[in-house]
Image: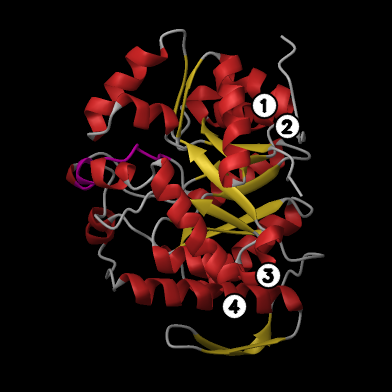
Amino acid sequence: MTKPFRFGLQAYSSSTPSDWRELAKKTEDIGFSSFHVADHYVGEGPALEAANHPLQNLAALPAMTVAAEATESIRIGCRVLCCDYHEPVVLAKEVATIDWFSEGRLELGLGAGWIRSEYEAMGIPMISPGKRIDKMVETLDLIRQHYSGDQIHLDGEYIKVSGFSGAPIPERMPPVMIGGGAKRILGIAGEHADIVSINFNNSAGKIGPEGVGSGTSAGTLQKLEWIKAGAGDRFSEIEIEIAAYFSVITDHSDVVANEFAKLFNLSSSEILDHPHCLIGQTSEVIERIQQRREEFGINYITFGGAAIDDVAPIVEALSGTRTASLSK
């Protein structure tokens, strides 16, 4: 069955506390399904420049808490929490507390980490990708045990805890999002997640042509096969999410696509067809979103915070629908 569309907004920073609260509330009022932060910590300097990543001036968990307090119904989350940056038992209690205060509105995003220069700048050892993924799976196991209300016992390779139960215990386990762009992480996501966030393959440890190039239509079809292999019979239950990192509402799509093409060593047609790009007039973007749900099964699209006003008509037209037409 075709899943209804839903939309998220991901914001990295805010100029003032009131601006952050207002952005969260505006996101909810427009009809977005979720409001997300990211999980990055280094400020301006060589480490951020090496990553080629936007500055995030807010820590994820406090920002999520404030967003939850400023809203009433929208899901609150982080796309995604880097498990290496958090002590596992503390993280389990923190996310459960946010879920409890928000009355069940947490969307739990977990990832295995990828920005090499950020690890190095913060003095955190960056173990191999496979080991980071194993640690993420153990972290998810710990969080599930926390939510169960039973005594926690985990004797993993990276997490060894026992002798206590979790508190607080929200009414139910939140939906779990696992994000990534390589074969093993997407297979694991298919096995364990309710929402799989398809991302670039960022094995280079930074944003650049290599990662963006992995996200083309052909690359996304390959990633879906990896998800299906991990999911097996439960694939039909999983939501497929993707971030439209390059979203431009314009009457000059060819010009904009050409600029992105030069930046990422792709052709203009590859950019226009790129699942992480939505470029064109509002009606054209709506059509592309519908086509991509048919082709890839993507029903959950996340936009960057700066695009909120431009994409509001798209969210209003498509949210919750299995078919839609633009009425404005």
Measured Cα–Cα span from mark 2 to mark 4: 33 Å
Which callout, 2 or 4, points to the residue nearer the camera? Answer: 2
Q: Are marks 1 and 3 in contact (CB under 8 Å)?
A: no
Q: Are marks 3 and 2 in contact (CB under 8 Å)?
A: no
Q: Which residues are magenta?
A: 47-57
- Residue tagged by mark 4? 142
Q: Which amino acid lies under the numbered mark 4 shown in the image of this protein?
A: Leu
N-terminal-most mark, 1 or 4:
4
Using the rendered view, name the quadrant where residue 230 is placed: bottom right
- Residue tagged by mark 1? 315
Q: Which amino acid lies under the numbered mark 3 shown in the image of this protein?
A: Asp
**Picture residue at 76% right of the left edge, 50% below the top:** 1
In this rendering, would 26 be left or right of 125? right
Q: Residues within 10 Å of mark 4 (few under 14, many from 20)?
A: many
Q: Nearer the viewer, residue 40 or 176?
A: 176
Q: Which mark is residue 233?
A: 3
N-terminal-most mark, 3 or 2:
3
Q: Residues within 10 Å of mark 2 (few under 14, many from 20)?
A: many
